[in-house]
Image (cartoon, helix red, strand yellow):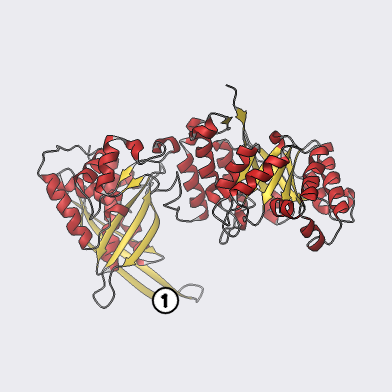
Amino acid sequence: MTRERLYLFDTTLRDGAQTNGVDFSLHDKRMIAALLDDLGIDYVEGGYPGANPADTELFAEKPDLHHARFTAFGMTRRAGRSISNDPGVAGLLEAKADAICFVAKSSAYQVRVALETTKEENLASIRDSVAAAKKAGREVMLDCEHFFDGYKEDAEFAIACAKAAYDSGARWVVLCDTNGGTMPHEVETIVTEVVKQIPGDHIGIHAHNDTEQAVANSLAAVRAGARQIQGTLNGLGERCGNANLCSLIPTLKLKKEFSNRFEVSVSDEKLATLVKASRALDDILNRAPDRHAPYVGASAFVTKTGIHASAILKDPATYEHVTPETVGNHRQVLVSDQAGRSNVLAELERAGIPFDKDDPKLTRLIDEVKTREAAGYAYESADASFDLLARRTLGRVPEFFRVDQFDVNVEQRYNAMGRRVTVAMAVVKVEVEGETLISAAEGNGPVNALDVALRKDLGRYQKYIDGLKLVDYRVRILNGGTEAVTRVLIESEDEAGERWTTVGVSPNIIDASFQALMDSVIYKLVKSNAAA
């Protein structure tokens, strides 16, 4: 059976840039465009030429994309102006882009109140703009802003806006749920009516996530006949975000309702890099990934309680709707104070730690986990620290180095510019194969200084940790008062992009941090088989 083609349109560089706290540099935009192109996205929208210097420079030279069509976004001609006398349209036509996506109101209310013009002039603006871009040799799209609210208010006019674009040569007419308030059944009903007048293979959906239904609305539109889906990586976007392509892509490829009928440009091989792409975007934005994001989150395929762990060992599909590796994720059975024997065995198996089911040390390991978690450790959140605890209990961790002493000093002083600054300095004394090594480093805080000093010189093991970096640091006070206990979780990443989390607990935050730092370095050495 021949499957229909679905087209993926990414708006991360524009819609995503409207996310509170997100500010893309020109370099960021070029990196993200390349990332999306490599993933297999059909259209990458770069932004609004002329809106700011970065976007203007981005469209001065088209990025070297191998698959995606680079797209410029902007308004149709303004009311009362001609195409030749509208600087916004001129900027779009001059932009080095394969396609142009115009945005126009498709709500009679918005035309009357926001644009303060007539329906006739709005329709003429759509026709003129699409025709001009088509004449210039561009692939043309129209994003029908406020389409669903406009349809419910005045269906005839909303459809007229869409048809004006299609009849003038638009390749895609995109129906936008601008305020994110439309329900999935409404989307399906309305799109069904639209495709009676405009072929579905020219209709797109652009859903916002204000009711947490952007993905559901996008899928509803596809069921009704739409064949282009707009969204953003990790669901970035203003207010509550846009339809999340990290959820849509695997759903389209892995759920039979869609995979039996449709094909998308993301290959199985690229689908297996989805977690990596998602985290790469978070790294660029210096944001912690959403651990609970569907498909790509660190907790997406995590199971905690013993009874579920037993079922997963027998049949992984029992509690997993897809195989984690298809999206680049992995199964994890958490070890916690609720841990039973099944959890521990499952985690040892996943980590590749050899064991004998009859080994009495396994009982000791379970007891040790429960004792330490009662003291504040959280192994369900620190996979690497559990790995080391298990290996140590089973007697399988070499002593790569020993820390004899560390010291941290924080002081305020005036710098060379006469400004008062706070500086942290750490000194770490380690012994590696009988040789004493002392390293000192400054940092923007005591933990940063300790991290840099510890990884500055580990003798023959240094080459294994050169690519190691700390990417996240979280602190929680477990109980208040003067005898408070602090838990520190540190997330690390190596040169291959693999991440892991370690934990430290102590009444002293520096001591807790150093425990987690030590585990991170030792885990990397174990993983790299540095003792060989």
Q: Foreground residue, 368 or 143?
A: 143
Residue drawn at the location 69% of the way across and 46% of the way down: 175
Report the label total.
Answer: 1
Residue 454 spot, x, y in % from top left = 30, 56
Q: Nearer the viewer, residue 49 or 148?
A: 148
The single residue placed furthest to the top in the displayed view is 1
- Please tell me in which quadrant of the rendered image residue 529 appears: top left
Q: Is residue 30 left or right of residue 324?
A: right
- Residue 301: x and y in percent read 37, 44
Q: Residue furthest left?
A: 360
Kind of residue at badge 1:
Arg
x, y percent for residue 89:
81, 49
- Quarter of the rendering occupied by the N terminus: top right
Quarter of the image where one finds residue 474 = bottom left
Query: Does the image show residue 360?
Result: yes
Horizontally, residue 36 falls left or right of residue 167, namely left
In percent of width and height, residue 344 lies at 22, 45
Q: Which residue is mark 1?
A: 413
Name the one closer to the observer, 459 or 94.
Answer: 94
- Taking depth in this image into account, of 155 and 142 the one nearest to the observer is 155
In the rendered image of this protein, does residue 3 appear above or below residue 337? above
Identify which residue is drawn at 74% across, 37% down. 196
Q: Secondary structure at mark 1?
A: strand
The C terminus, quarter of image: top left
Residue 310 figure quarter: top left
Say if residue 457 shows up in the picture. no
Q: Residues within 10 Å of mark 1 (few under 14, many from 20)?
A: few
